Amino acid sequence: MPNIVEVKNLNAAYGQSKVLFDISLAIKPNERVSIVGRNGAGKTTLLKCMAGLLTPTNGSVVFNGMELGQKPPYEVARMGLKYIDQDKHVFLDLTVRENLQLSSYATNDYDWDKVFAHFPKLKILIDRKGAYLSGGERQMLMIGRAILGDPKVLLIDEPTEGLAPSIVDDLVTTFHELSKDCAILTVGQNLSFVSRVAERIYAMKEGKLVAEVTDEAEIKANSYSCYL
């Protein structure tokens, strides 16, 4: 099966400070992959390069057989590669309904039933403003907005940060369900979550990928924890 995403020899920097060093990875359709590493390892920078939010100094990102090059992030998203940041940004002055309407307008996808199938609570909160949603509810809304347009890949930064254990458990189930329709790449440090979601794990340290774990027993045993 061909890869849906290929990152090849990617390097990135902020000014004179180099952050990523020759990163290469691949993701297959409907695969659940995680990148683990300490804060400052370069995980978020990598996702931003993949999503077109940051221009790498060299290297390439190939999505669905097409090199993304200098494509702007909105075009990358329209192609089906979507990034969900860790800060749980929703439009605070808009209701859940209005947040979804904006995503529907951008994607021409008004099928909210699939959003409510994964996140039934959003249907109950449909007229609540974003400012009054909990962290878990905002995460639901961000993912719900992202799946409009039927993306092929979701890049999700620190999906469990600040969430209650019960919400994290729900996300495990949701990500397994979502992967029937798209590939998912998450980054973070929550080993319990990663071990229950990921089929394959990359360990990242100081801007480099230093290990790849594919064995199910090793994943469940958190054998990559030495890199955190």
Image: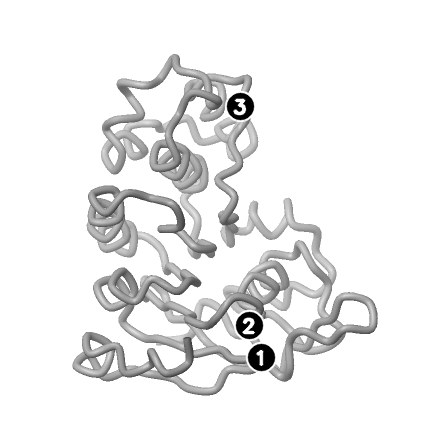
Which residue in the protein does label 1 denote?
206
What secondary structure is marked by label 1? loop
Q: Residue at x 32, y 75 (%)?
A: 200
Give the distance between the C-alpha atoms of the residues marked 1 and 2, in whole angstroms: 5 Å
- The three-letter code of the residue at mark 2 reads Ala
Q: Quadrant of the N terminus?
A: bottom left
Quadrant holding the C terminus:
bottom left
Q: Secondary structure at mark 2?
A: loop
User: Which residue is found at the position 30% from the left and 67% from the top?
Assistant: 191
Residue contact between numbered discs 3 and 1, judged by CB atoms under 8 Å: no
Tell me which amino acid carries mark 1: Glu
Q: Which residue is mark 3?
A: 92
Q: Nearer the viewer, residue 84 or 41?
A: 41
**Residue 215, position in %: x, y?**
23, 84
Tell me which label, 3 or 1, sits earlier in the chain: 3
Q: Do tag 1 and tag 2 residues touch (Cβ < 8 Å)?
A: yes
Q: Residues within 10 Å of mark 3 (few under 14, many from 20)?
A: some
Residue 41 marker: 2
**Residue 116, which numbered label?**
none
Q: Residues within 10 Å of mark 1 (few under 14, many from 20)?
A: some
Q: How is the image coloured?
A: one colour
Question: Secondary structure beneath disc 3?
Answer: loop
